[in-house]
Image (cartoon, grey):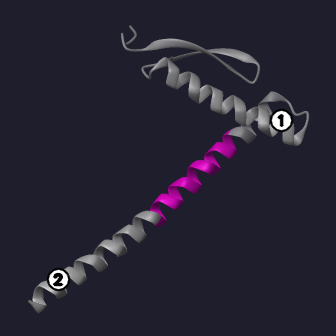
Amino acid sequence: MTDPKTRAVTVRIGGKDYSIRSDADPAYTRRCAEYVDNRISGIGKDLGALDIQKLTILAALSITDSLFQMQEDEECLSTEVTVAIDSMVDQLEQAILEE
């Protein structure tokens, strides 16, 4: 038995239609599929005629690379924010002690 929140959404990726079952908003599922399809199309334009399986693998690797880069950027930013906050706390402590 399927979850009543789960809906089937038909999306087109790489020129083929797929029925995706998800509890996510159908518009979100379509947006995700469109993103993947655009990556596949972009890679196909850049590299020329490759079969859809190779294009799909390259798109998956490209999307994964973007994800990993964003995670790394987030970690660096988090570290920078933590250092800045620690510095401000130290400055506040010094100001309080000087009073």
With respect to residue 66, does 49 lie above or below?
Answer: above
Residue to which mark 1 is pinned: 44
Residue at 24%, 82% in the rendered image:
90
94 versus 54 height, above or below = below
Predominant SS along the magenta part: helix
The answer to whether residue 56 is visible is no
Q: Looking at the image, is 67 positioned above or below residue 52? A: below
Q: CA distance from mark 1 to mark 2?
A: 58 Å
Which residue is located at x 12 percent, y 84 percent?
A: 96
Q: Label 1: how many residues lie within 10 Å, few (<14), some (14-19) or many (20+)?
A: many
**Callout 2: SS:** helix
Could you say which disc has been placed on residue 93 in the image?
2
User: Residue most toward the left?
Assistant: 99
Quadrant in which the C terminus appears: bottom left
Q: Which residues are magenta?
A: 60-76
Nearest the eye: 58 or 84: 84
Quadrant, the N terminus:
top left
